[in-house]
Structures are given as C-alpha cells and as structure tokens.
Amino acid sequence: MKMRICSLAALMLAFIACGKKENEPAKGAAKSQEFFVRGVVREVKADGKTAVIHHEEIPNYMEAMTMPFRARDPKELSELKPGDEIHFRFVVAELESWIDRVTKTGRVVTGTNSATTNAPTRRDFRTVRDVEPLRIGDPLPNYPLTNQLGRAFGLHDFKGRGVAITFIFTRCPVPDFCPRMSNRFADAQKKLLATSGAPKNWHFLSVTFDVDRDTPEVLKSYAERLTYDPARWTFATGALIEVDALTEQFGLVFPRDGTVFNHNLRTVVVDATGRVQRVFLGNEWKADELVAELTKAAQAK
C-alpha cells in the first residue's frame, strides 16, 4: 500500500513537471530589460558587430550619450553609415547587452533643431602629454593619482606587488563594459583571497577617466557596492592630463562625444618589478585568466 502511494505521488510530480514549459524561467530568475531608442550612428566598427551611436535619453536607465553597442546579428549593421538616424531595441541582461530590430529612419540634416542630431560631435579640447605606447617588458611610469579615501599616491608605490589595472567610469550602465571589468576584478579578488598558497603581494587598481564626476567619495561608494577589500583594491582618480597619458600609453581612448564617453577597454597586469607583463584587450577575458597572470606577476624578481 505504501509503495502504491509513493508511486502515485511520483506520477503526480512528473505530470506537473511535464506541464511546465521547457524554457520557462524559474521563479525569481533575473529578467532582461528592453528599451526602444532613437539615435544617430557615429561609426560602425571594423569588426562589423559594433556601432557607436549617439542616442537619446533612456528614461530611468541612461542619460543621452555616445556609446558602443553590440548587435546580436551583425547583418543589422551592414548597411549603416555615419550620420544615419536609426531606432533600435536595446536589450540589457544581467551580464551582457545587445541591440536588434535596427531600422534606419533618415539622415542627419545640418542645422536641424533635433535634440538627437544636434548633439556636439567634436571632442572636448584638453591638454595632453606626448607619450610613447607601453609594450610588454616596459617599466610603468610613476603617475600621481588620488585614491577613494582622498589620499595621494603614485604608481611606483605598488612595486613589489603584482598589480592589475583597469579603466572605468562609475556612471557606465552597460553590463558588458565597465560593470563587467569591475565584476571580473571582484571575482578575481574573491578567488585569490580564497586560494590557499596564493601569493600575498598582489593588488587591483581601477582608474576612472571621468575625473570631473568620479570624486573620491563617488569612487568609495562604488567600491563598497563591489565588496572590495581596501587593502587589496584601490579606486583612483587624478588630474586629467595624468589619466589621459596613462590610458593613451595602453591604447585606451575615451573621446567625449555629447555628454559622456565612447571608449574601448584595456586591462593591464604589471609585475612585481614594475614592468608591463600583459595587456588584455576588450572584455572577453575571464577572472581565472587574470588570477593566473597576477599570480605570475607577483612572483617576478
């Protein structure tokens, strides 16, 4: 009798499970956000997968700015040219974002009063240093910066430690750009702290290039949301001329177009002797790769 009852219960559970759609998300699963946006194409990257678009404000998500957007299907960008007015769907998932349903609606007309097409297109003028690119094995210059606690420091203060450096701005809302860099650092920090036998002489450094808005107070608040260890992870700002020179030496550019930045991504590992060990391009690297590089960097003599 007991066996029959158990069998009946199992059949009922199987019936319920079959009634659930195969791809139905579990309760509490994170849902993606969808926004329908207008903008003007500034550039289609050579990879054919990315378009730099100056877009209107996305209410409750992002102010009007110029940003790179990745198309899920590169064919959607194949006919676009700089100056094309478009509307598109912007999908933001937990760890990535993309655009689709891209439709060309017109061309920018000089002299129009449209808020979208009349946005500034020149880069802000700023004084810059004449610097040479840094290559693998080159010593890292001693740029002066200020940390999230308002204390001044120089890059040479990290000599004797393996250091991972990335570049962000705290207002960046697109999950595959600055948030991904910061989350990967957080993951790598967690892995190193939890690994027995890992070297102790390592450090993370996140440098903002939005020096006007990312004050030490803003950086500290941002760092706390990432559960950072201040003994292991520094967030830094500085004079624009210093930040600009440092980023340029690693091939990172952040021209201002409109209100915020159109930027690429660089993450740098510097060894304990103060020399460049590796430069990660883009956002495809994983936390485990960074941990391996940083472990190697910490052991350099």
Image (cartoon, rainbow, N blue to C red):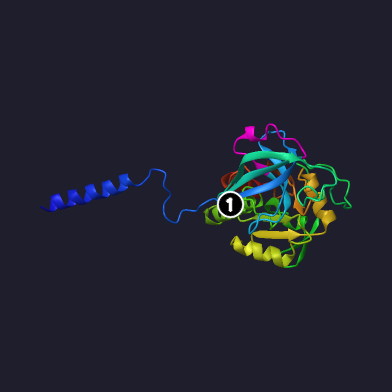
Q: How far across and how far down the image is residue 171, in percent?
A: 69, 57
The residue under label 1 is: 188
Name above or below for residue 7 compared with residue 233: above
172 or 37, which lies in front? 37
220 or 270, which lies in front? 220
**Image-quadrant location for residue 238:** bottom right
Q: Residue furthest left?
A: 1
246 or 212, which lies in front? 212
Q: Is the magenta stretch mostly helix, strand or loop?
A: loop
Left or right of residue 31: residue 3: left
Residue at x 76% of width, y 60% of height: 237
Q: How far across and how far down the image is residue 190, in percent?
A: 55, 56
**Image-quadrant location for residue 61:** bottom right
Report whether residue 173 is seen: yes
Report whether residue 136 is seen: no
Residue range corresponding to the magenta coloring: 69-83
Residue at x 67% of width, y 44% of height: 87
16 or 128, which lies in front? 16
Name above or below for residue 226 compared with residue 74: below
Left or right of residue 117: residue 29: left
Residue 75 among magenta residues? yes
